[in-house]
Amino acid sequence: MKKANKALAALLALTMVTGSLAGCGSSNGSGKTETAPATEGTTETADAGASASGADTLVASSAHFEGKFSPFFAASAEDQHIVDMTQIGLVGADRQGAIVEKGIEGETRSYNGTDYTYYTASDLEMTQNDDGSVYYDVTIRDDLTFSDGTPITIDDVIFSMYVYCDPTYDGSATLYSQPILGMDEYREGMATLSSLIAAAGEDNTDFSLWTEDQQTAFWAAVNDGGTAFAQEIVDYMAENHGTTDVASAADGWGFTLADGATVKDFFMAIGDQYGWNFSSMEAETAGSALSDLIPEDVYNYSTVGVKTGDSADYIEGIQKTGDYSMRVVTTEVSANMIYQLSFAIAPLSYYGDASLYDYDNNKFGFEKGDLSKVRSVTTAPMGAGPYTFKEFSNGVVYLDSNPSYFQGEPKIKHLNFLETQEDDKVVGVESGTIDIADPSYSTEVRNQITEYNGGSEDFDGDVITLRLYDFLGYGYVAMSADNIKVGSDPASEQSKDLRKAIATILAVYRDEGIDSYYGDSASVINYPISNTSWAAPQVTDDGYQIAYSTDVDGNPIYTDGMSAEEKYEAAAQAALGFFEAAGYTVEDGKLTAAPEGAKLGYQVNIGAGGSGDHPSFLLLKNAADAFAKIGFTLTVNDIAVASELYSTYQSGVAEMWVAAWSATADPDMYQLYHSKGATNYYKINDSELDEMIVAARQSVDQTYRKSLYKAAMEIIMDWGVEVPVYQRSECYIFSSERINISTLTPDMTPYWSWMSEVEKLELN
């Protein structure tokens, strides 16, 4: 059901807001633009892959390209890779996604026990003022050029910012949502043609802002293609979920309509939901693309700006201070603002119109509300990245090295990204048609690599070299403080002790469960944050400890040299101590009675397909057996339909559940753990925790924020509402025969891949 997809999307809403932040530049954008023709097929794949034998060509696998390689409108992760290779970002990040502030002279930071120096296109200085405002002073290098030889100045940066902030911009960048001084005044007084016509209604007779022909074309498109789009959803819901009318189908899809609603009513609701941005409405498809059902000229109405009133001529908080410097002023601290500055520096001369740029007279390279020139070159990027775009043909993107790249021309002259099916990635590297691939890592893939390497389990095999890195997300077991408590107060020490009793036994069985499901492709984590984050506690940090490894008095449960069975017994005894402190009656090592408001057993929901297929399933089964020995019942409810699992905790009825969070470059905890957070399903309500989360949001000092988040995580763990379980691995594989492995960038992460230092990579 689409409703389930939306629920999942809400859980994973904390995704990167600024593209990869990993390469030489990153972009914020995705959106609906025209596409270049692309063809998938085994013939084209084989032909393109054959170039891997070339002495000066590197071939990397890719999933399907949308063909939208614009830094403003890249529509997929695959398209974003091309953007990263052809552009440079205004600011950059390190291996943990933390912003590099002194990129011109270089900034050295330690990761995994090694010091690395990071160089970027700019220096960034942040100043918090007494009135709550923040200055972001940016200075770019004065020796940068685009690949066509045009010097880069701060005017290119300002032009790029105004594109992102235009009232008609419909990519995925959200720079315009930041509290930049004067942003609201600049964006008001203009709306898109599609939204205005829709709001006026089909019987409108006022054609002062659009023509009668435009209105007629719009409603013809709604009544024809729009209703067809909605009808596909209705048909899908009827066939797969037994809905009987439009209203019930819409409800299952996540829209509330009155009884007797028509298919047109459904499409109108979709339009209202997305502000009549046809590109965004594509997300609701049950099959056909909306762009295939609505005439192109009408589809473009959502990108046409119409002046409806007065607005400011410029954004007051975007201030040019020199040929290579600027200041961005926000009216308040926004933790996400620093990441928004990672956008690509796009050439004004290529994406805009230089004759329309005059900073002093409030002209910024295009007419406000008209991004047609920017959109016209969506399929052919140009920038200052390590490679230049040559062509996209038959599922292959062809790139050539950029001699003017500021970190040095890549040693490999040509880089091809080849559309490759998942099953063909490992065999492609083994056969020599691909040099680099990113298969979904699994035990099966590991065994396949081992076989190709002649039985060697060495990561640096003779045929294939394997590099693992942590996936952005992590898995966990959660508890609702409202539903697992003693008495009526979820915040009482007794309530916390009850939840920590449960968590202590769950935590001790994590290793076996994860090892059995993932093998070496996942590891147990100990804090409620992805290990990929710059704010994640490291093993070498003071105070680092295994999750739920102390007893009710704060003493360590485990000692060096303990066997697994000894650990299980120690955890059970510690759990009994927590239960007793919570008010449970303990007799002869078993629970015999629960305090008021509590129970002798709780239910945990897990989406294991009804068959136990989940990395945390064995953990729960082993824990259930351990609980049974001490007189406590843990009921494992394996839910086959994911949407039903989500609804149990989103509605607040679940006692316990198993799920996973995705990570972001910025570790802001408000949404998840603040008492007013939209996805605080744990029902934590802690004033001290709230203050820490808000304080971290109100600071631009990353070191200070990390200390706050460490303290916040200790409070979260003390509440006993989340047991961090695992973080799985992803991988890159490389041809050991073709690539000089010693030139691969070390210590890869989700924020720092082989592409991040592609200029250093060499072929054998």
Image (spheres, rainbow, N blue to C red):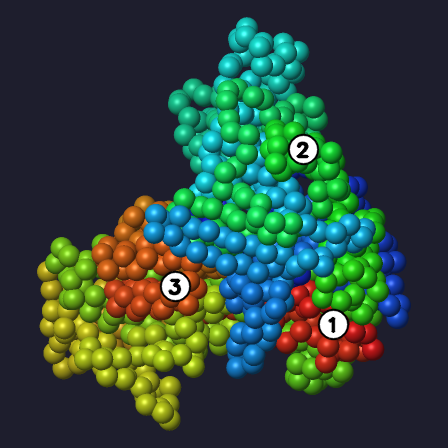
Q: Residue at x 13, y 55 (%)?
A: 488
> Mark 3 — residue?
705
Residue 334 percent across, percent down from the top left: 42, 50
In front of the other: 127 or 741: 127
**Which disc number belongs to residue 339?**
none
Q: Which residue is mark 1?
A: 760
* Cα distance between the residues tagged 2 and 1: 37 Å
Q: Is residue 299 left or right of residue 340?
A: right
From the image, tell me which residue sits under label 2: 366
Q: Is residue 68 left or right of residue 516?
A: right
Instruction: State the image coordinates of residue 278 (x, y, percent, origin top left).
Output: 60, 31
> Hey, which quadrant is residue 214 in on the image?
top right
* Image point (18%, 63%), residue name: 495
Q: x and y percent of residue 625 in the render?
A: 31, 74
Q: Does residue 112 sit above or below 326 in this rendering?
A: below
User: Residue at point 25% right, 64% down?
Assistant: 719
Element type at marker 2?
loop
In this view, 243 is above or below 82:
above
For badge 1, the amino acid type reads Lys
- Rendered location of residue 641, percent (x, y): 45, 50
Disc with the residue nearer the chain's start (3 vs 1):
3
- The earlier-in-sequence mark between 2 and 1 is 2
3D distance between C-alphas at marks 2 and 3? 39 Å
